[in-house]
């Protein structure tokens, strides 16, 4: 097994194939032109694949362009399959994964490889009329959008922010869900006795509760009694604050992450600055 300590890395020409493939798929020191072109190709295929999936749901399109769509699906399946196999092949070089099939299996069960596998399987499934019941599985190709996070620094930044704020976001979402059920139960108790449409049961009142708390306000269901309107007004005030909390948390997380990255970028040039040992002046 090839291994190299930092500061004593072997030249790329003498590295084993697996090590070079790992550096190509998961560059840790910036991407070279070939790696950028490869990632750009994958991103284009992912977006094109999603666009084809969306267009194929238009009535008549699949019947006319079915063979072309099928050929494109199989082509994407080959490319994604090769990438998936290559990532499994370099698993022993990933930190925390042991050599052998156990390490590959453990890596294959992580979220991104599972998404890759689902996308590949959905691309291989035929969309013929004989298997019309399986045609809905073709929409699994929309999961390929999640693969873009691997090739985009911006999407990776979003992922880091969400992971760091996961606890606070989960608590806020839980409070919002509880508030939705409380609002639906309260309005059901007030409006059901008055026979107001849309409040005949708590499940039906949940629609009004969700629409109201998210400040969408379709107006198709609304309270009619004075007590119900007063309760709805209080619920709206709570809803504006509670639904806005996750956005504020993510925004503050972005600010903190960008500040941390900026401090890292400023620290790198400073650490590389050299000073004269005699006079102490900065050397250029």
Image (cartoon, rainbow, N blue to C red):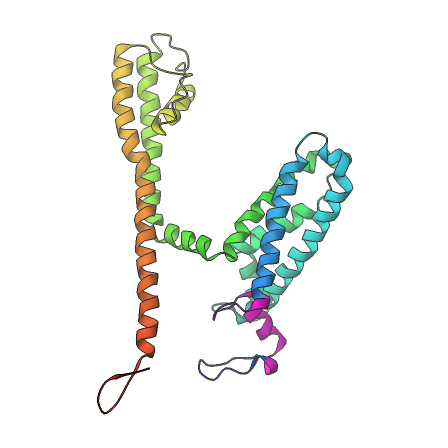
User: Height in image: 232 above or below 23?
Assistant: above
Residue 198 placement: quadrant: top left
Q: Is residue 117 visible?
A: no
Viewer-side residue, 233 vs 115: 233
Residue 47 percent across, percent down from the top left: 59, 48
**Magenta stretch contains residue 71:** no
Residue 249 placement: quadrant: top left
Taking 214 as reference, is 121 left or right? Answer: right
Residue 139 percent across, percent down from the top left: 62, 40
Residue 76 percent across, percent down from the top left: 68, 52
User: Height in image: 146 above or below 271?
Assistant: above
**Magenta stretch contains residue 16:** yes
User: Height in image: 274 above or below 54?
Assistant: below
- State the residue at coordinates (47%, 68%): 96
- State the residue at coordinates (62%, 49%): 119
Viewer-side residue, 170 vs 243: 243
User: Height in image: 97 above or below 2?
Assistant: above
Residue 195 placement: quadrant: top left
Viewer-side residue, 272 vs 139: 272
Which portion, as a residue range, is magenta? 13-34
Taking 90 as reference, is 123 left or right? Answer: right
Q: Is residue 207 visible?
A: yes
């Amino acid at each position: 097994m090839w291994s190299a300590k930092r500061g004593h890395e072997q030249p790329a020409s003498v590295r084993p194939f697996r090590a070079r493939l790992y550096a190509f798929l998961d560059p840790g020191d910036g991407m070279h032109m070939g790696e950028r072109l490869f990632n750009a190709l994958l991103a284009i295929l992912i977006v094109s694949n999603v666009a084809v999936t969306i267009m194929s749901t238009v009535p008549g399109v699949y019947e006319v362009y079915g063979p072309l769509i099928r050929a494109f699906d199989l082509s994407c399946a080959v490319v994604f399959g090769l990438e998936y196999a290559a990532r499994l092949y370099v698993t022993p070089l990933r930190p925390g994964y042991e050599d052998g099939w156990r390490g590959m299996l453990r890596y294959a069960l992580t979220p991104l490889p599972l998404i890759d596998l689902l996308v590949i399987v959905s691309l291989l499934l035929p969309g013929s009329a004989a298997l019309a019941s399986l045609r809905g599985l073709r929409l699994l190709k929309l999961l390929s959008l999640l693969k873009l996070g691997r090739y985009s620094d911006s999407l990776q930044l979003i992922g880091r922010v969400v992971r760091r704020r996961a606890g606070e976001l989960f608590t806020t979402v839980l409070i919002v869900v509880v508030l939705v059920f409380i609002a639906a139960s309260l309005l059901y108790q007030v409006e059901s006795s008055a026979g107001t449409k849309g409040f005949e049961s708590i499940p039906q009142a949940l629609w009004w509760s969700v629409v109201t708390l998210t400040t969408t306000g379709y107006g198709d269901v609304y309270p009619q009694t004075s007590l119900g309107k007063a309760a709805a007004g209080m619920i709206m005030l709570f809803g504006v604050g509670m639904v806005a909390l996750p956005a504020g948390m993510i925004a503050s997380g972005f600010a903190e992450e960008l500040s941390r990255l900026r401090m890292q970028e400023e620290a790198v040039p400073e650490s590389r600055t050299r000073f004269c040992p005699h006079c102490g002046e900065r050397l250029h």
